[in-house]
Image (cartoon, rainbow, N blue to C red):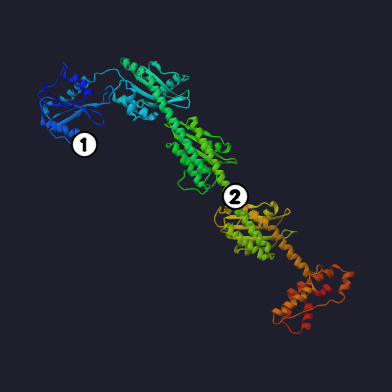
Amino acid sequence: MNGVGKLFQNEEYLPLWDKVFFSEKNPFDYTNSFIFTLRTDHEIVSAKQIGPKSAGLDAAFTNYYHNRKNNDFLLLDEQYTYIESDQYVHVEHAPLIKVGLLTRMEPKQLQHLPNLLNWVEKTMFPPTASFMNVEQLLEASNYQIRFKPLIEALFRLNDQLQSPLKLILLERREMDFKHKTGWDHLSSSVIKLGEQKVSELLDGVKSSTNMIEISGEVTDQEQAVHTVIPLFYEETSFACIIASTDEQHQHSMNVFKSASRWLQQLLQKGFKVDRDENEAKKKDLLLEVTKKFYSTMDISEVLAKIVYAIKQTYPSFNVYLMLSHEWEVREELPIKPLVYGSEGMNTKAEHAFLTGMKQIEKNDKNQIVHLFMPLRGKQGIYGVLEIRATKDDTLPKEEISFIEILADTGGNALENAELYQQSRDLIHDLKLINKATHQINMNLNLNDLIKSMTHQIQEAFGAQEVGFFLFDRNDHTVIHQSGTVFFESGENSEQLNPLIQQLLIKKDPIYMGDTSLHAEIDTGPFRSLLAIPMLQKEAVHGAVFVFHQESYYFTFESFKLLQSLVHHSTLAFTNTLLHEELEKLVITDHLTSLHSRNHLEASMDQSILEHEKGTFLLIDIDNFKSINIHTVTKLEMKLLFKLPILFETTFVKQILQLDGVEKNLLSIFQKSSLLQALR
């Protein structure tokens, strides 16, 4: 057959070989041996040998064929070379293929091999105005009827087929169309001009529109012939494909126009599949998140699930949680404190927190979009969800609505968890108050009562120092003071006089996170201070002071709890004071303030039992009762009140040191002012 041999037969490609070997312009030198191949991405589908048979060339081809089939590197004999075309070409009803050439390394003919291969390729596949078909596009996308894989396959095939058409993709963002791919080699100003022209062109276009033809320049540096294929979803254009070329390739543009209908329908179908899958994914995710929200009362778990849901749906978004409460959460969570009125606080975030309305902020300089979504509950707003999207990401209304639903669901879950925690705290507080109230009501002794309350406060609040002050009902002077070590010193107590006066005047509790900020207050090494007045019928009967060395150690909840605890214990303190006063009235004479005879006898009996020895003094003032009843004077009353003091200070001390009771008694009375008072 004039030197032409067949290595293996594939009838589908015979017409292509016939074009080459029966061409009148055949450039082959049949004295040399060549093997031409046709291959796809997966395998060699056909091969032809030209020239005399060569066992070495056959062995080299066999080696190459098996290694291509096994996807290994080519292990050719160094005496042979293999070259192939740079681009794939389209064969009707067949996958894309490349043309290859295998021959012996002859220095004289090496420079002619590329020209020979190029002639074979052009003879097999003469340039024609063609465009890919549906089968090719689906195969290139691995039969994924989804928008992104189809678009990627469309642009990739267009390049592989060396089409004279330039394809551009623009996507709608809010009201305008923005460049996605195809104009990357142009400047931003030129791209912006093209975006404006396309946005104006597609403004108000109906979904029944198949394509729009444009003559002239869309951008200052683009070709003059354009065809725009708008893509619609639910009557709204979400993107468009632009094919551009010059007037010399008008025929190629006509072929593209003929394919515009099926291309539009296929891409719209892919977008709908994407949206349906995305909606289904969001519903499943929302259901999963909602189940998690209502199955846990752990605030950290709720916040982690919010971030997880956003990241699953929008992987490229940056998510931050701005919280108004100081919850104990995981360290890895993207938490930001929400400090209203601070200098670094974003005004949009503040507005979202105060109004409960979503806010969107666009930074044209950095091309970043900020979405601030409030975490709303039924009883309040617990923070703000901040989402940052770059210029390559879109935030359409339906996506914002989904984020809003997610944020509201998360806000309700946060509220439920917070209310649950509050209820547990309230139960704990009530148990503490009930326990403390029960213990203080069991002790009517003032010292025991203060000791019990001090222990309860130190245990519940972690206080380092606790002090109690009780005031006189008439002049509000301090009649009793006790507590821990700090309050045993009179000097330390005097330093608290400004606070005591404030409690007496304003009758409001005092919370100080850092006493060093108040120059008028000196509490030594202690920085945190709580001062609670004991109020009973609008009167201040006493005060409780609680200290700690660490600044801002006590929380506001601790402050309120201590206030409640003191309120419940005030009545017990008042009853204890009244009880001690009543006991004193029972054992003393109201007129003279001297102990009654019953108390005297009881004290004597107790002294006889407890002491080995002692002295008993009895002083009788003759006829004083008759005088007291009828002609009592201020002088006589003054004398009676001075007698107990005189006995306690001077008389008792001296009489225990001297012999002769009557003698010394007389001398003492002479030295004292008692005789002067009697006279």
Where residue 551 appears, as percent x and y from the top left, is: 55, 54
At label 2, the amino acid type is: Ser
| Disc assigned to residue 423 | 2
Considering depth in this image, is 213 or 207 the residue closer to the camera?
207
Residue 656 relative to residue 196: left or right: right
Of the two numbered discs 1 and 2 on the same chain, state the one appearing first in sequence.
1
Considering depth in this image, is 428 or 494 the residue closer to the camera?
428
Q: Residues within 10 Å of mark 1 (few under 14, many from 20)?
A: few
Q: Quadrant of residue 97?
A: top left
Q: Quadrant of residue 143?
A: top left
Quadrant position of the N terminus in the picture: top left
Where residue 186 appears, as percent x and y from the top left, is: 36, 25
Residue 21 relative to residue 510: left or right: left
| Residue matched to label 1 | 73
Q: Element under label 2? A: helix
Q: Is residue 4 above or below residue 436?
A: above
Considering depth in this image, is 246 or 38 the residue closer to the camera?
38
